[in-house]
Image (spheres, grey):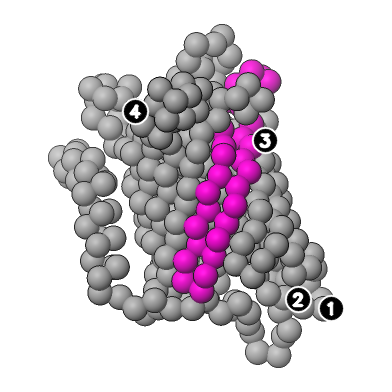
Amino acid sequence: MKTTRNLLNMFRRPMVVGISILLILFVSLPAIGQDDEGNKPAGKELARPAFESVWIIDQQTVILPTAKTLEFDFQHRFGTVQNGISDFYGIYAPGANVRLGLNYTPMEKLSVGLGFAKYKKYVDLNAKYAIFQQAKEKGMPVSMSFFGNVAMDTRSDAEGSYTGETDVHRLSYYGELIIARRINSKISVQISPSFTHYNAVDSLYAGTTVTMKNDMIGLGVAARYKFTAQSSLQISYVQPFGSSTEMPKPGLAIGWEISTSAHAFQFFVSNYQGILPQENIMYNPLDFGKGEVLIGFNITRLWNF
């Protein structure tokens, strides 16, 4: 138990750790270009990757960086825009969320990563495996990958709701199968069924009479329209299948991506503030249709080792 507490104390300082790593990487490491052909097996003509980044707003995409690539993720969600100019449409709001992540691709088709999020002081370990890739002409019509993570709520007992409980109650799990197709040089689409599990949840959703469950099935769909060599429009939608239509709310986001060989920048409007997929799909209280939206952005940076 003492060892676990020491780990928790370390993880409660994610911003210090993440920013330090970020500064070291930007100063010391050279940038690389991303091979558009991805992980191309000998003798096979594969389609170009369906997306430019591992993210399409709030969802993972089907692609992985090439082997021996280190990726840094900086994801930020401001507060909701409902207060208008008083907090500059959420930019100065106290409810902002941020996540810093590092992912590495040690071999073809596999990436592993670690992330730190401000909200609930989540620490997450994640992995993605490319099952197969779309063929250029004849053969496999789609690409498929599996993504999964395990996250830990590292708030102190005073900050959270785990007083007197074991640390295993702090854990949550997420897994999804991502299926994507590059339709042509401009349009790509994907669908991703998912499963979320929390070891411990509240009996009711906050402010409602809706009973919470430990498990949640979800379905995500996303699409990209590339209108220049570096810019594309993106849309993302995630539907949870719970016991009520009241909670949690589905997630909808619309954004703009600018990408280069080593960077991707996404700027969007969304009603998801949790960043981690299990947090969004299990707890999201914001309703896009009622204007309960926020401004967010994702930045990714690649290096070769």
Q: Give the mark nearest the N terminus, 2 or 4.
A: 4
Mark 3 residue element:
strand
In the image, the segment drawn in magenta is 244-271
Q: Position of residue 22 (x, y in %)?
A: 28, 60
Q: Nearer the viewer, residue 135 or 187?
A: 187
Q: Amino acid at mark 2?
A: Ala
Q: Position of residue 127 (x, y in %)?
A: 48, 59
Q: Is residue 192 above or below residue 246?
A: below
Residue denoted by label 1 = 138
Q: Is residue 142 visible?
A: no
Mark seen at residue 239: 3
Which mark, residue 94?
4
Depth check, mark 2 against mark 4: the one in front is 4
**Disc 2 designates what residue?**
135
Tag 2 and tag 1, C-beta contact below 8 Å: yes
In this view, the residue in front, 278 or 5, is: 278
Magenta span contains residue 143 = no
Residue depicted at 56% across the width and 79% down the height:
35
Q: Residue at x 73, y 84 (%)?
A: 45
**Mark 3 vs 1, N-terminal side:** 1
The residue type indicated by label 1 comes to: Lys
Q: Between tags 1 and 4, which lies in front?
A: 4
Give the distance between the C-alpha atoms of the residues marked 3 and 4, in whole angstroms. Answer: 27 Å
How far is mark 2 from mark 4, CA to CA?
47 Å
Does label 1 or label 4 sit earlier along the sequence? 4
Upstream in sequence: badge 3 or badge 4: 4
